[in-house]
Image (tube, rainbow, N blue to C red):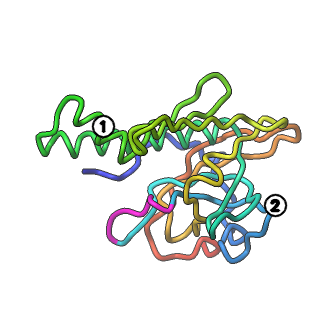
Amino acid sequence: MNNEPAARPQNPASRPPADLSHLHPDNVRIGSIAVFAGGWAWTGQPPRIPVGFVGTLIDYWNGWAVWRCTREVAEAVVADQQRLRDAERDRLAEMGMTGTDLDHAVDESAPPLRFDGDDLVLDETVLYGESAVDRHSPGPDGRYCPMGFHWTWTIADQHPDLTQFVWQVWTGRRWRLIGIVDVPRDSTPAGAR
């Protein structure tokens, strides 16, 4: 199974500043912008996170980060969950699993996550054996708290942990998604590039 993120065209103007030391987990406080990744996301050797998501830290829950983001970033979270689901489906199908058994195993391993209008909807019914659908509506400012107080999010070190992260800029009126940024696999600290 290939866990590498798909290649995406890059606009050099969309690259973040070279010094991203303010994003290091030790420097992040409540209200700070950071890069977040699921605690389940580590993969490969050396272990890395295929994609992280830029948002604002708003709290901690049982030691895990709780954060908010724009709809564009929430959509990237949904897309990454679907990537995990597709990879799990392929893995299980290669083992010979088919039909309803395959569908249930995928839903149990990586529950469906989707948008229903403006609501972010997670369906963990298969996992719990009873109706377990969580709806997360955007706040008054239109920002989302992706599965906050529910999923185990961590603040990711932008180097060397991440392979890519979703990058945004503040336009003066709102956050605007400007690209998916590849993080080089070399050992050069981000501030030294």
Q: Which residue is mark 2?
A: 31
Which residue is at 23% across, 41% downward? 90
| Residue 38: image location, x then y, percent | 52, 57
Residue 192, placed above or below residue 34: below
Residue 6 visible? The answer is no
**Crowd class of label 1 (few under 14; some 14 to 19; many from 20; radius 10 Å):** some
Outermost residue toward the front in this view = 130
Residue 27, placed above or below residue 156: below
| Residue 138: image location, x then y, percent | 74, 36
In depth, the one of 141 and 2 nearer the eye is 141
Task: Please name the amino acid that badge 1 sits on.
Answer: His
Task: Please name the amino acid that badge 2 sits on.
Answer: Gly
Question: Disc 1 or 2, which lies upstream in sequence?
Answer: 2
- Magenta segment: 39-45
- State left or right for residue 4 relative to residue 132: left
| Residue 153: image location, x then y, percent | 58, 59
Residue 109 visible? The answer is yes
- State left or right for residue 121 relative to residue 109: right
Outermost residue toward the right in this view = 172
Q: What secondary structure prevails in the magenta region?
A: loop
Outermost residue toward the top in this view = 117
Write down the quadrant of residue 25 in the picture: bottom right
| Residue 165: image location, x then y, percent | 56, 53
Asked whether residue 61 is drawn in magenta, I would say: no
Asked whether residue 40 is drawn in magenta, I would say: yes
Mark drawn on residue 104: 1
**Crowd class of label 2 (few under 14; some 14 to 19; many from 20; radius 10 Å):** few
